[in-house]
Amino acid sequence: MTELPFEQVRTLLAVVDEGTFEAAAEALHVTPSAVSQRIKTLEQRTGRVLLMRTKPVRPTESGQVVLRFARQLATLEGEVWAELGIAGRPGPARLPIAVNADSLATWFLPALARVPRDPPVCFDLYREDEAHTAALLREGQVMAAVTSAAQPVAGCLVRPLGLARYLPVAAPRFAARHLSDGPLERSLPEAPVIVFDRRDELQDRFVRTLTSGRTGAARYRHHVPSSEGFCDAVAAGLGWGLVPEPQARPLLRSGALVEPAPGRKMDVPLYWQQWKLDVPALALAAETIAAAAAGSLYPPQ
Amino acid sequence: MTELPFEQVRTLLAVVDEGTFEAAAEALHVTPSAVSQRIKTLEQRTGRVLLMRTKPVRPTESGQVVLRFARQLATLEGEVWAELGIAGRPGPARLPIAVNADSLATWFLPALARVPRDPPVCFDLYREDEAHTAALLREGQVMAAVTSAAQPVAGCLVRPLGLARYLPVAAPRFAARHLSDGPLERSLPEAPVIVFDRRDELQDRFVRTLTSGRTGAARYRHHVPSSEGFCDAVAAGLGWGLVPEPQARPLLRSGALVEPAPGRKMDVPLYWQQWKLDVPALALAAETIAAAAAGSLYPPQ
């Protein structure tokens, strides 16, 4: 990797960030054909196609590896400027981190507020989308992620943070209408359910556990892709759902929600994935966030 | 459009929804080469390339138009089954709607809970991403959207819903540290700011209004792409930001937030965009949501 020509690597980064060869050319103050030539040379050098020529262009798997290198390079350069105390430094350090929506809505921001911000650091959060987080890490768009994916992404370290607990809850009048007739194993699979998005399988997994696998996915599903919107939709009586314990507790106490299956819960393990790269600001954030997670989540098994 | 062969149109829909020709073939119980042949025929018939052969495949602009037609067709078919009261009906009506994050976190879900659900209807919400909402509407992935985009998307009707009000707020100790020294026109542009994501220009617009356009974008920015996470980040003292009035009011009352520029605000007009198609469930939802918006938002100018 050390023999990759930096100018071409930076050009690849500009093309992906700007979306087109033309926009990258403008950003780099060169002609589009110079951009095109540099990418071709880089592809010949690596022996791989690095970009899909779509609009906007998208990196191939090989392209993602080179991109991560480009972004790590830019971060290390920033560190050098900071350590040298050079005035022309382009601004505060940037820490791009992907976070799953429920963590973002519960324990993550109080944790982030505890990360020392001297020297100044900007947090650049991405709401984790399971499907994209691996790609964001792989191409170095984010330096780290709070994710339910245990498998380390190529080029990343992984450490367990703890278990996020979810409680099955419903509004009282919803429970009275849909869940009071006969055993829960029969009524719950037939009742309207709130799910986060198409990839959210937590509710279906809970139903399978409850019915020992005898039932398929609920037919009557609302999709509410927002952590607090999800909780609001349950409280508004649109359906039942598994709500993070920190959001559910106050509403259970006030009577806005009830537990149709008292004592039942689902625990989801969360992990911290980060670049294998010695960036002091990242190491400091990782320690603070892991300590806060230990205080907010249940211990990993 | 009426002479488009339905089988080929449905095949196009399956390919886009499943992501690959192979997965579509499996879903439709035909061979991949049959799928490929149908798409080719449809492209010859329309004289346009309809799909980019990426992984997953993506519709071209022309492909989006045919896709909207395909989804509208599927919806109308569903209506026919419902009206005929046919038992083999595939399930409750589906209402896919895109909603901007701040509406989803404030007035939208209580509004949605008021939409009559007899006959049964499933709400399939997409968190609006300005950049994608137009495409979602254009290709018919959603039937309607709550959006700040006033320009009607091709094939859609637009109506104003009202003005969402945002208040510039900060945590008390943040204001004391960053905003108490000299006039706000000088201190605010230098202070750390929370912005939703890269496309969020609300804070920058507020600073330009405050300084009569003399200042550029803040250098010290945190990106927090979650409506409640945004409010939490401001309350945690990470930066100042413009928070929706319904979220800001209780925190201002409790003293968790202060207004560095009392009386200042930003109003963002919101619109309802929907298919030009007579679907009763959609019409009912549109009326209920518009009425609720009129009760929660400020009147449009």
Image (tube, coloured by chain):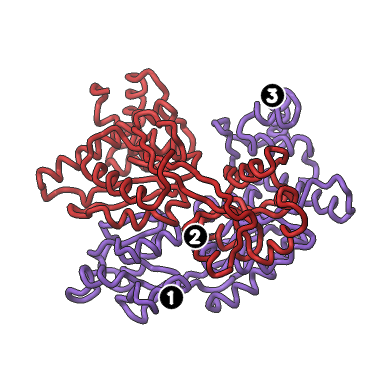
Chain colours: A purple, B red
Q: Position of residue B283 (x, y in %)?
A: 25, 42
Question: Circle 3 sits on which residue?
Answer: A32
User: What amino acid does circle 3 point to?
Assistant: Pro
Circles 1 and 3: CB distance less than 8 Å?
no
Q: Helix, strand or loop at disc 3?
A: helix
Residue at the extreme bottom of the image, as rendered: A263
Q: Nearer the viewer, residue B28 or B190?
A: B190
Question: Circle 2 sits on which residue?
Answer: B247
Question: Circle 1 sits on which residue?
Answer: A250
Residue at the extreme front of the image, as rendered: B263
Q: Is residue B68 above or below residue A171?
A: above
Q: Chain of mark 1?
A: A
Q: Chain of mark 3?
A: A
Q: Nearer the viewer, residue B236 or B177?
A: B177
Q: Quadrant of residue B278?
A: top left
Q: Helix, strand or loop at disc 1?
A: helix
Left or right: A218 as drawn, with respect to B64: left
Residue in the picture at 38% in, 62% down: A232
Residue in the picture at 61% in, 62% down: B258
Q: Quadrant of residue B16?
A: top left
Q: Is residue A289 above or below residue A81?
A: below
Residue in the picture at 33% in, 76% down: A259
Q: Position of residue A242 (x, y in %)?
A: 38, 68
Q: Nearer the viewer, residue A79 or B117?
A: B117
Residues indicated by labels 3 and 2 sit on the same polypeptide chain: no
